[in-house]
Amino acid sequence: MLDFLAENNLCGQAILRIVSCGNAIIAELLRLSEFIPGVFRLKDKADQQKYGEIIFDFSYFKGPEVCEGKLEAKPDLLDLDDEFRENNIEILTRFYLAFQSVHKYIVDLNRYLDDLNEGIYIQQTLETVLLNEDGKQLLCEALYLYGVMLLVIDQKIEGEVRERMLVSYYRYSAARSADSNMDDICKLLRSTGYSSQPGAKRPPNYPESYFSRVPISETFISMVIGRLRSDDIYNQVSAYPLPEHRSTALATQAAMLYVLLYFDPSILHTQQAKMREIVDKYFPDNWVISIYMGICVNLAEAWEPYKAAKTALNYTLDLSNVKEQASRYASVTERVHTQVRQLLKEGCLREEIVLDNIPKLLNCLRDCNVAIRWLMLHTADSACDPNNKRLRQIKDQVLTDSKFNPKILFQLLLDTAQFEFILKEMFKQMLSEKQEKWESFKKEGSERMAELADVFSGVKPLTRVEKNENLQAWFREISKQIMSLNYDDSTAAGRKTVQLIQALEEVQEFHQLESNLQVCQFLADTRKFLHQMIRTINIKEEVLITMQIVGDLSYAWQLIDSFTSIMQESIRANPSMVTKLRATFLKLASALDMPLLRINQANSPDLLSVSQYYSGELVSYVRKVLQIIPESMFTSLLKIIKLQTHDIIEVPTRLDKDKLRDYAQLGPRYEVAKLTHAISIFTEGILMMKTTLVGIIKVDPKQLLEDGIRKELVKRVALALHRGLTFNPKAKPSELMPKLKDMAATMDGFHRSFEYIQDYVNIYGLKIWQEEVSRIINYNVEQECNNFLRTKIQDWQSMYQSTHIPIPKFAPVDESVTFIGRLCREILRITDPKVACYIDQLNTWYDMKNHQEVTNSRLLSEIQDTLGTFGLNGLDRLLCFMIVKELQNFLSMFQKTVLRDKPVLDALKMLMNSVNPLKGIVASSSKVYSTAIAKTQKIWAAYLDAIMKVGQMQILRRQIANELNYSCRFDSKHLAAALENLNKAILADIEAHYQDPSLPYPKEDNTLLYEITAYLEAAGIHNPLNKIYITTKRLPYFPIVNFLFLVSQLPKLQYNKNFGMACRKPADPIDWPPLVLGLLTLLKQFHSRYTEQFLALIGQFVRSTMEQCTSQKIPEMPADVVGALLFLEDYVRYTKLPRRVVEAHVPTFIFDEFRTVL
C-alpha cells in the first residue's frame, strides 16, 4: 500500500494540508492577539464617550438601519466614523481573515470527512485511515487543533472585542455583500461569556456549547477519542521505558484527549468507566497539563462541572496521592541534581565514558526532564486560581512536600540543559566521524596483527623471538579477518569483532606469550582497537532522537517567564552565567518542532512566517532576560556620571606640585575605575554567548548587547525628556528657560558618560546616541502630529518605533500627547501676541504690560543644546501642522461668518461698487471705508485671532530656520555649502526648463525634489513665508475682506520711532509683526491675483485718503496712511519682492517721503 504521506497519496496530502494550515492559523491568532486596537475594549471613559456610539456589538444586526440612522443624524459622528475606518480598516481586515480561516478550517475538515465516507479516496475509509500510523496521528491532530483555535481565540481575544471588530469590519468593508460566510463566522465566534480575567466565573456548558457551534460527525469524534484512549499513537513509550515515566511519555496525547473530550461532553458527564480508564492511563500522577505551546490547564478546575470526570480525578487529587507524588519528585530532584553536577565536572563527559554509559546517561536525562516538567507545571501560578480554596490547598501541599525552591529548580533546569547540550554536540560529532573512526581503528588493528606475523617470521632483527610459522600464519589470518569487517553490515561486524577479541585473549594464554612484553602490548592494543570499533558501531541516531523527545520543553513556553527574575539575578551576580543560559534557550527552541513539523511535511508556504513568529517570540524573551546587563551597566554609568560631574575636579594645565595631592582624588578615581571594570565584565558576559541560531533567527551576542544598550538608553532618555519638559502654565516667570537648561545638563551627562564608556564596551557611542535620540524625538513629533492627521500613524506602522528597541509611551499630562507638544505649546503661550510684543530688529519678545523681556533668540539655541538639530526640526514640523490647522479653521470660519452672512455680503458688495475701478480714487473715502468697517465689525475679533496665531508661528519658524542654518554652517560647513549650491543649481535648471521646455526637468517619479527638501529644511535653507500650507478654492470677496481687516486694525496701532508700529492700548492687544506675517501667509495660499488686488486696494486707500487730506488742507499725514505704507514696506521686505510691485499702486514720492514726515 502507498505510504500515507507520499506526494501522490491524495488522501494523506489532503489531511496533512489541513493540519499544517491549523498550526499556521494558531500562530496568526497568537500574533494578532498582541495587536488588538485598544479602542475596541472601550475600557476607559474617554474611549466610551468618544467611540461608544460608533462601535457596536452583535446587537447591531438586530437593526442596522436604526444604528446607521443615528449616525447619519449627527455629522460629527459620521466624520469620526470615517476617520475611525481609515485608521483601523487594515488591522480589522487582518483579524477578519484570521477569523474567516478558522471557519474555513472546520468546513474543510468536515468536507474531507464527507469525502472519506463517500469513497472519493479510492480504498480509503475513516477506519483504514485510523489504522495507518500517520493517518491516525493526523486525524486526531486535525480535530485537536480546531479545539485549540477556539480556546486560543477565547483566551486571547475577548468575546465582546471580537463582536465589535466583526461588526466594524462588516460596516466598513466593501466586500460584505459578496461574502456569504459573514453570518457563519459571526455564529461561530459570537461571545461565549468567558473571561480570562482572574476570578471571573466560568459560563455554564463552557466550552462544550462553544465547540458544538459547527456540527462535526459524531462517529468521527468517538473513533478519534477511542484511538487516543487505547493507542500510543506517537510511539513515545519507547523513549520512556520506565513505568513511572508513562504519563510524561503520553503527555502530548493526554493534551489532545483533554481538548477532544469537549467535543463529546457525555463522556465527561456520565461515562464513569471510560473516564476512570482515561485518568488511570494519562493522569494517575499529574493534574496540570500543557495543551499547546505552554497554554496550561488545571484539570481539578477544568473538570469541576463534570460528574464522571470529577469522580475519576478524585483518586489522583487525593491528598495522600498528592503527597506521595510530591515527595517522590523531591527525592528524585535531589538525586539527579547531584548526578548531573558530577557529570558536568571537567573531564567527566569524555568520549569513551559516554559510549560505555549511554543507557545510564539517558536514564539520568529522563529523570531530570520528568522531574522538571512535573514541578514546573504543578507549582505554576498561572495554573492555580488563587480564589479557589481546593486548588490552593493542593498547590500548598505540593509546595510543602516537594520542598519546592524555584532557585533550585532553575539551577536543575540550567544544568540539565547544559548536560543535554554537551551530550547532543558530542553525539553529533561522533555520528559525523563514525565511519572514518571505525575504518581507522580497523586499519590500525589489522596492521598490528600483520606486524606480529612479521615478528614470528624470525627474520626481524632485535626481536629475540623464535620463528613460529603457525603463529605467523594465524596472525596473518587474523589481520585479514579484521580487514574483511564490513561497516555497512554492522550486526555481523559486531558479532565477528567480539569473536576476534576472544581469539586474541586465548592466543595469549595458550601460547605463553605473556613473557614477551612487546607481543603482549601489541595484542592489548589490537584488542583495544577492536573494542573501540564495537563502541563506534553502537553510536546510533536513535540516541539523538530519544534525547530530542525527552528534552522537550514546549510545556514551559509561557511558564519560563516566572524564572526571568531568577535568571537576571544570577546574571547580575555572575555575568558568565550567560553561557549556561544559552543551552536553556536552545532547549526552549525545541518547542518550535511541534507546530512546525506538519507545516514542513506539507511543504507549506506558511513555514517561514510561523517559524519567524515563534523564533521572534523566543528571541524577544532572550532579549528580555539579557536586558539586565545593559540595565546594570547604566546603573553603574549613572554613578560614573555623578562622580565625573560632581566629585572629580578637572586638572588644570598648570598647577603647584604641593596641590597635586588635592587633584589626585584617588578615592573617586578608584571608584570610577571599579565601576568601569564592572561594566566591562558585564559586556564580557554577554559576548561569551557565541552566535546562536534560535529557531530560524541568528542571535549575535554583539548585536544583542548593542540593542540592549540602545533599549536602555532610549528608556532613560525618553523618561528624562518626559519628566524634564513638563511646564506649569501658571508659573511666573515661565519655567521654560530653567527647565531647558536643566534638561541640557541631563542630556550632556548622558552624552558624556556614553562617550566615556564606548571603548570599554566596544560600541560606536556617538552613532548610537545620534540614531536613538533622533528616533525618540521623531517618534514623539509623529505622535504629536497624529492629533492633526485624519489617518493616524499607528505604532506598528511607524518607521521610528521598533519592537526590539521600543520607545516608551507616557500618559499625556495635558492637551499635548508628548514632551515636544508641551514644549511647543509653552513657547506659543509665552510669545502669544495678546501678551507679548515682538521686536523684529532685536529678535526679542517683550511683555506688553510691564515691558520686561519675555524671551529672545537664545531660547532656540537652548533647544538646540537640549534636543539637538532633530529637536528643532521636529518643533518646526509640529508648527507646520499647527499652521495648517489654523488655516483650515480660518477657511471654515470665513465660509461661516462672511459668505453665509447676508448683511456682511451686502456691505462688501456696496464697498466693491464704491472702490471700482481700483486705479481710480474713492470719493469721500473716509465715510465709505468707515461705513464698511462698521457693518462688518463682528467678524474681526475671530479674524484677528487666526491671523495673529499664524503670524506668531511663522515668526518662530523663521527663528528656527535661522538657528538651524547658523549651526549647520558652523558644525558642517561643507554640507551647508553643498546643499546651497545644489539647491541653486536645481532651481536654475527648473527655471530654464520653464523658459525652454526641451531642457530637462525632474520627472514625476523622481524623488529628488522631495528628498532635498527634507535636507534643506533640516539645514534651515528655506523661507517658511514662501511655503504653501493648504490647497484652496476660489473665495469671492477675499482680497477686499483682507483689506478691510487691515484698515480696521490700523487705528489700534501707533508709530514709534524706536521700534516701528506698536500697540496703542495694552487693553486691546495687537502686535504688528505677527499681523503682517499672518496676512502675508494667508494671501500666499491663494492665487497671486488676490494679492495683486489686495495691494491695489491698499494703494487706492492711501491715494484716496491723501487726496481727501489735501482737499481739506490737513497738513500731516493721517496715522492710518502711515500704517498702510508701513505695511507695504514690511510686505516688500519680508517677501523679498522688488519695490516696483508696491510703486505700481502708490506714487513713488509718497513712498519716499513718508518717513521724513514722521
Image: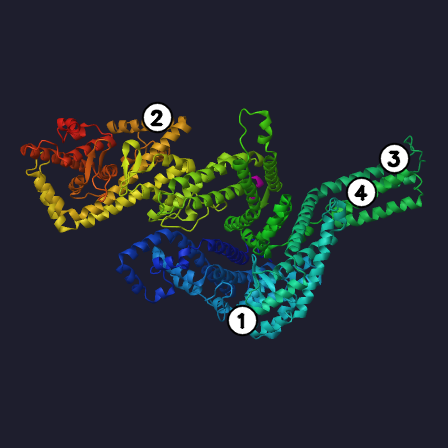
Return the disc, 2 or 1, that comes first in the chain's sequence.
Answer: 1
- Asked if residue 89 shows in the view, the reply is yes
Which of pointers 2 and 3 indicates the residue nearer the eye? 2
> From mark 2 to mark 1, how far is it between C-alphas?
80 Å
SS label for mark 2: helix
Instruction: State the extent of the magenta-drawn residues as a range.
Output: 698-702
Q: Is residue 121 left or right of residue 850?
A: right
The quarter of the picture where the N terminus appears is bottom right
Q: Residue at x 52, y 68 (%)?
A: 263
Task: Give the residue pinned by disc 4.
Answer: 529
Report how far apart the C-alphas of labels 3 and 1 lie in the structure.
Answer: 82 Å
Examine the structure image and report whether residue 565 is included in the region drawn in magenta: no
Disc assigned to residue 265: 1
> Is residue 1126 or residue 551 the one in the foreground?
1126
Q: Residue at x 21, y 42 (%)?
A: 1065
Q: Disc 2 marks which amino acid?
A: Asn
Between the C-alphas of marks 3 and 4, the distance is 20 Å
Q: What's the CA distance linking mark 2 and mark 3? A: 92 Å
Residue 637 % position (x, y): 55, 40
Mark 2 vs mark 1: in front: 2
Q: Nearer the viewer, residue 93 or 796?
A: 796
Q: Which residue is mark 2?
A: 981
Q: Secondary structure at mark 4?
A: helix
Instruction: Find disc 3 in the rendering and name its residue.
Output: 454
- How many numbered dots are placed on residues in this image? 4
